[in-house]
Image (cartoon, helix red, strand yellow):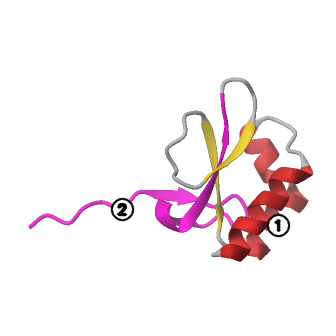
Amino acid sequence: MKTRKIPQRMCTGCMEMKPKKELIRVVKNEQGEISVDVTGKKPGRGAYICKNVNCLEKAFKTKKLEKNLNIKIVEEIYDKLREEIENE
């Protein structure tokens, strides 16, 4: 039986390749709205972050999420991400 390929994505905080299922996706849709995509299926430009507070802090300090999505990200999105990570 053939083994299935596991999709890999890069974390914007630690810059490591990890399986897509282990990461949280942040999405910018066509209207320019930013949201946290838990399912990983929303349409739009996506950036991924580890389920680790240290990676989130590093991405926040270096503004990597803003650079990847080409938009200013408000503090509420970071708070929502932090809440999502702590609930895991």
CA separation in Å, label 2 and label 1: 26 Å
x and y percent of residue 52 in the render? 70, 74
Range shown magenta? 1-29
Q: Residue at x 60, y 67 (%)?
A: 16
For the residue pair 9 and 72, the one nearer the viewer reads as 72
Q: Is residue 4 magenta?
A: yes
Q: What residue type is labelled 1?
A: Lys
Q: Is mark 2 on a helix, strand or loop?
A: loop
**Residue 15 falls left or right of residue 34:** left
CA neighbours of label 2 inside 10 A, class few (<14), some (14 to 19), many (20+): few
x and y percent of residue 4 in the render? 24, 61
What label does residue 6 carry, if any?
2
Q: Which amino acid does label 2 sit on?
A: Ile
The answer to which image quadrant residue 72 occupies is top right
Q: Where does label 1 land, which residue?
A: 58
Q: In this view, does 2 lie above or below 41?
A: below
The quarter of the picture where the C terminus appears is bottom right
Q: Which residue is drawn at 90% across and 61% down?
A: 61
Q: In this view, does 20 lie above or below 47?
A: below
For the residue pair 73 and 6, the one nearer the viewer reads as 73
